[in-house]
Amino acid sequence: MISAGPAYLQLSIGKTHRRKKRQTITDMETQKINKEELCNRDLSEQIKAVTKDSHVRAENTELMLAYQRGNISLAQYKLFLCSLHEIYQALEEALDNNSNHASVAPIYFPMELARLESLEKDLEHFYGPNWREKIVVPAATKRYAHRLRQIGKDNPEYLVSHAYTRYLGDLSGGTVLGRITQKSLGLKSGEGLLFFSFPGVSSPNRFKQLYRSRMNSIELSDEERKGVLDEAVLAFELNIQVFDDLQKMLSETEGETKSDILTKNESMSESMHTPSCTRHLATHSKLDEGEKLMAKSLQIQPSLIHSSPFIRMLLGICVALATVGMGIYAF
């Protein structure tokens, strides 16, 4: 009897291969359609599409989840402000330097959107007049700021991605995050919360429409557009790295604080025991000297002090009474 196994196996493999081939063609056609749809969209819609997954990841970082739960601490907020200052300082310097660039001019709104001055006032509120000497930022924040300065010199059109990501994100969630921060930290209205306030924008929704319209009017070559879209993804990645680094820094700070507390408690515990032992030994040393002096004054031989515990006890009582008497006198 001839086995049909190999023939059946070949037929099965052939069908699987054809299914995979059809699936590959379908995937390629879908990707082609998606690319065509993406090319036909406005720049703002394209950025929204390519950063969709990154947006979700940013919202699910530990720092942002803490914000969403209303569990923000003062330490978290202060570190957050420090990094925001570093980022906006680099961004707004780059925007100012390229304000006449064809890609930057349409979305240049310093009067309405600039955050640097507000951040400086918030930092002064928490750190005092010498706040510049006290703020610290993680490595990810420095990398973000370096990238902003780099594209400000080499590819000013890429600033559109960062400005859109930062300003419209802050404008959209600023009011909500401001209220969460105020409630979580028990701050008074406007006290260390100026970053979330946009006094130059009377209607956030209308302004965002204007901003998107201006951004969509920017003329870009296919290569420049691709660069702007890639930069938008990078902007989210840089923000995610900053959030993660801030959380690590906070965890390390809390760990050091706990370690310091434990060390302090151990030191206090030692000070409650070791010094008392020292005092106890010192007291015995003084008593020994006192005993010798008392024995001398009473004309008792030193050998009798060591051989007779009773005599030593009496001498101790005499020394104690003498010490108390001296204390009363001194008082």
Image (cartoon, rainbow, N blue to C red):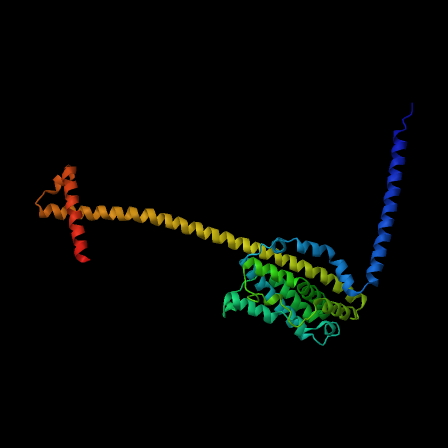
Residue that sits furthest to the right in the current view? 1
Residue 159 horizontal/vertical position (percent):
70, 68
Residue 41 visible in the picture? yes
Q: Can residue 138 be spotted in the picture? A: no
Vertical order, 181 against 25 (above or below): below
| Quarter residue 78 falls in | bottom right
Nearest the eye: 192 or 158: 192
The quadrant in which the C terminus is found is bottom left
Q: In front here: 10 or 128?
A: 128
Q: Where is 182 relative to 323, above or below?
A: below
- Horizontally, residue 101 falls left or right of residue 120, namely right
- The part of the image, by quadrant, that contains residue 202 is bottom right
Q: Farthest residue to the bottom: give it.
A: 100
Q: Residue at x 83, y 62 (%)?
A: 39
Residue 32: % across, % down: 85, 56
Give the residue at the far left of this rendering: 299
Apparent side of residue 50 relative to residue 95 in the rendered image (left or right): right
Quarter of the image with the N terminus is top right
Viewer-nearest residue: 72 or 165: 72
Residue 279, percent from left and from top: 27, 49
Q: Is residue 31 left or right of residue 104?
A: right
Residue at figure coordinates x 62%, y 68% from the top left? 197
In this rendering, the answer to whether 108 lies above or below 276 is: below
User: Residue at the location (45% across, 53% down)?
Assistant: 260
Q: How many marks?
A: 0
Residue 181 is situated, as x and y percent measured from the top left of the image, at 58, 60
